[in-house]
Image (tube, grey):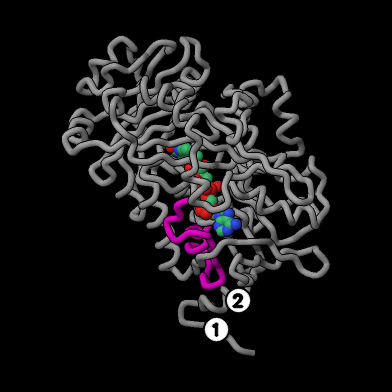
Amino acid sequence: MSHWITGQGVSAKAKGSDEPSVLIVGAGTFGTSTAYHLAQTYHDTSKVTIVDRATSPPKPAAGVDINRIIRTDYASSFYNNLAYEAWHAWFWSMELQAYFHQTGWLMMDDSKDSSLSNAIRQQYRDRGSDPTEDLSLDDLPQQWGGVLEGTDTKGFGTAYFSPEVGWCDAAGATHNFMQAAEKKGINRVNAGVARILLDEGNSRVVGVETTDGQELRADKVVIAAGAWTSSLLSPLEDTLQVSSRDRIENQLRTIGVLQIYYPVSDEEIRRFEEHKVPVIIYGQEGEVVPPHSKNKLLKYTHNHSFTNTVTTPSGAKVTCPAGSTYESQLNDIPDALKHEAETGILSRLLPTFTKGKKADHWRICYDARTPTEDFLICKYPHGNLSGLYIATGGSSHAYKFLPNIGKYIVNVLEDRSNGEEKDKAWAWKAYGWDVREKSPEHPKLGAWTPKRELRDIGSGAAQSKL
Ligand SMILES: Cc1cc2nc3c(=O)[nH]c(=O)nc-3n(C[C@H](O)[C@H](O)[C@H](O)COP(=O)(O)OP(=O)(O)OC[C@H]3O[C@@H](n4cnc5c(N)ncnc54)[C@H](O)[C@@H]3O)c2cc1C
């Protein structure tokens, strides 16, 4: 019998021989974080592979952009606590701290009794330390060196400032986190995944086949494909004859929003920096993130979301990004959608930086949204299938958890509980989207369901109700 014993105890190789091989599909937020945490815990890291259709940092990912907001402001104690855990890492992690910029945020809210601002600030008070302060809407044009001059505050009832919020260079941070995992021996493959492979009895997942014909085999496969999750799983759900009610489409849906990037001069950047202009949340309309000398772009998000529903050859209805290539998914934007943003947020918020100017570029960003905005981190529950796991459902707020979410995904992969609260929140739900939408207990959540199709925007058929 051979031993792999060293002076330190059992060698990495011997311990590693018991470790199941893992294949992660998707190197966005959930996938990268999983790879990073497996790299910290696996003895034989060569058993972990991550595959993405785009090179690092993958441009199609919701988690890859010039910036993403890092906030601890949450109405629920659950995500408030999780965000503080992540926030600590944004300050102290050697791999991430260089990408984080603490600016604070100004949140303008719809009405005086708006439940969101109030609930967030109440949550801070409940935990015993509230860093936020009231701001007067009337004073905003004079604040921050007059950067907000011309901003339309009509329709807003309250405003508050939260100093802990900031933004990070999400492309840089994701790439650096991935590189840290690769340095520890994780493999990264650049290929599109065409389908999930089962064993002969359709009882176990054995890997995936890529669009260029490679087979990547592993004991465990984690689907971290974000907005593409439902379409990737659909053929497998056909094979397993999963009913429409039990399909992943009933757990999460693809949601898209438009982002607009305006060029700014060095002088304008200096003005933003000198006056410490925060991230600005413009109620439910969208947001703007300050520019930086590295990106020289002022980025707006136009929050009026949409989806794209297709019918598969088997007749299943699936939501997924619209367009046949990822470049077209990001860049083919109907003029009517651009017009909607131009006459909305772009002319109302910080208009001196957009008026008479041409955007540098536009991008549609897609994410997977769940009915409750809780993530989906679990074993795939149907068909008695072993080896298949889901890690996604970011619901437009998961990026900030890049540092820590992978730790919890690894626990699910290794059959360990994350504690009752997390297990419940991130589980496959017994009831689906349609039930939640109609539930009187969740009227607000139903309001966030994407209610219009991208293809209908401008045709008169779309109803913007978000
Ligand atoms: C406009 C917008 C703004 C947001 N702002 C914030 C914010 O400020 N702060 C915050 O915390 N969160 C924010 N979010 C949410 C956050 O970005 C997402 O929740 C998170 O990135 C989702 O992570 P993911 O891993 O599920 O998906 P992604 O990051 O999208 O990654 C999925 C990856 O899977 C790959 N993939 C998919 N299918 C395949 C396939 N078949 N083969 C190979 N690769 C595949 C894709 O290429 C992609 O790289 C925002 C989201 C959007 C859309």
- Is 36 or 227 nearer to us in this picture? 227
Give residue 17's mark: 2
Q: Where in the figure is residue 69, as x and y percent of width and height?
A: 40, 37
Please state which amino acid type lies under the numbered disc 1. Trp
* Location of the N terminus (image quadrant): bottom right
Judge depth for marks 1 and 2 and give the one in front.
2
Magenta extent: 34-60
User: Toward the viewer: 297 or 24?
Assistant: 297
Q: Quadrant of residue 450?
A: top right
**Going 58% across and 44% down the picture, which residue do you hit?**
322
- Image vertical order of residue 115 relative to residue 217, above or below: above
Q: Residue at x 73, y 24 (%)?
A: 438
On residue 4, the disc is 1
Badge 2 marks a residue whose secondary structure is: loop
Image quarter of the C terminus: top right
Q: Earlier in the sequence, mark 1 or mark 2?
A: 1
Q: Are marks 1 and 2 in contact (CB under 8 Å)?
A: yes
Answer yes or no: is residue 31 visible: no
Could you tell me which residue is drawn at 45 percent across and 52 percent down?
A: 59
Q: Secondary structure at mark 1?
A: loop
| Residue 364 in the image: above or below residue 463 | below
Queried whether the magenta region covers residue 45, the answer comes back as yes
Residue found farthest to the bottom: 1
The magenta stretch spans residue 39: yes
Residue type, mark 2 in image: Ser
